[in-house]
């Protein structure tokens, strides 16, 4: 089991460019989460999918950010027209979500996005 | 929404001593409280959790205490070792919902 895989590990974009971040959850896990980590804001929840359906995107900035989960094996976080304040480590996590109880989240190593 | 406050931003202990990290939360509906560890350049790794139906849980050298009345929980690491050095995050969520809200992290340094 390779764990949650995030690619790329590092991404540098110029201001105004688009950035797409990829996440492969652990096989068999039905829930996928995206978080953003910065020194100032700490760990911020962005969005949550269960069985590929968006469940909660209350943490997503309303403009420029979007997330998708087209199949069980990957999710993407897309940031359009990137700004320097988007620079952060973006973490993806997955969980089994077999029932209604809260479960352990398994995190990937993150993608460090730097917007110049 | 839920807000989790982690009181110690840094903590330094001598090898073999105990370390205690304290967190408080605001939402009375929260009932699941996990702790995660993050080493440099890596993602978060689960270490231990506690649910609101108990007030104490132990796993080897780790003890978690929960005080629901005070909306406070804490992580105790006994007999600390240098490999315990990392950033520790507390988190909270509701029982039937998996979104975790994290504290700001505590950087623990265990000095030999």
Image: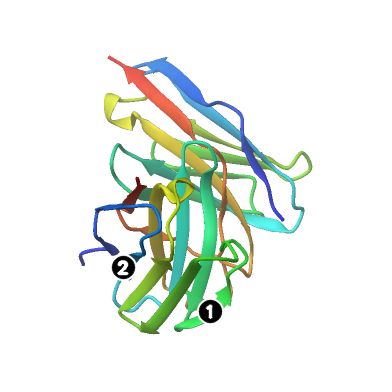
Q: Position of residue A115 (x, y in %)?
A: 36, 48
Q: Is residue B43 above or below residue B86?
A: below
Numbered disc 1: secondary structure: strand
Badge 2: chain ID:
A
The earlier-in-sequence mark between 2 and 1 is 2
- Residue at position x 35%, y 83% from top? A72
The residue under label 2 is A22
Q: Nearer the viewer, residue A110 or B88?
A: A110
Please tell me whether residue A21 is drawn above or below residue B12 in the rendered image: below
On-image quarter of the C terminus of chain A:
top left
Q: Is residue B5 above or below residue A95?
A: above
Residue A2 on image: x %, y %:
20, 64
**Residue on which disc 1 sits:** A54
Q: Is residue B46 visible?
A: no
Going by the image, does B94 lie left or right of B49?
A: right
Q: Residue at x 29, y 76 (%)?
A: A27
Give coordinates of residue A63: x percent, y percent.
Answer: 56, 66
Q: Residue at 36%, 61% (x, y): give it.
A: A17
């Amino acid at each position: 089991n390779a764990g949650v895989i995030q690619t790329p590990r590092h991404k540098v974009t110029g201001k105004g460019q688009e950035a797409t971040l990829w996440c492969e959850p652990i096989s068999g896990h039905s829930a996928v989460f995206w978080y953003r980590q910065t020194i100032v804001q700490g760990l911020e929840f962005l969005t949550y999918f269960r069985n590929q359906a968006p469940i909660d995107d209350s943490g997503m900035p309303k403009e420029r950010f979007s997330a998708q989960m087209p199949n069980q094996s990957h999710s993407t976080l897309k940031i359009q027209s990137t700004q320097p304040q988007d620079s952060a480590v973006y973490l993806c996590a997955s969980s089994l979500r077999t029932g209604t109880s809260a479960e352990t989240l398994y995190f990937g190593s993150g993608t460090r996005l730097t917007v110049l | 929404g839920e807000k989790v406050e982690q009181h110690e931003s840094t903590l330094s202990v001598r090898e073999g001593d105990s370390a205690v990290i304290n967190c408080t939360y605001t939402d009375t509906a929260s009932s699941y409280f996990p702790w995660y560890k993050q080493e440099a350049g890596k993602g978060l790794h689960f270490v231990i959790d506690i649910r609101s139906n108990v007030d104490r849980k132990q796993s080897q050298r780790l003890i978690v205490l929960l005080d629901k009345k005070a909306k406070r929980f804490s992580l105790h690491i006994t007999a600390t070792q240098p490999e315990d050095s990392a950033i520790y995050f507390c988190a909270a969520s509701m029982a039937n919902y998996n979104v975790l809200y994290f504290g700001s992290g505590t950087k623990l340094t265990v000095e030999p």
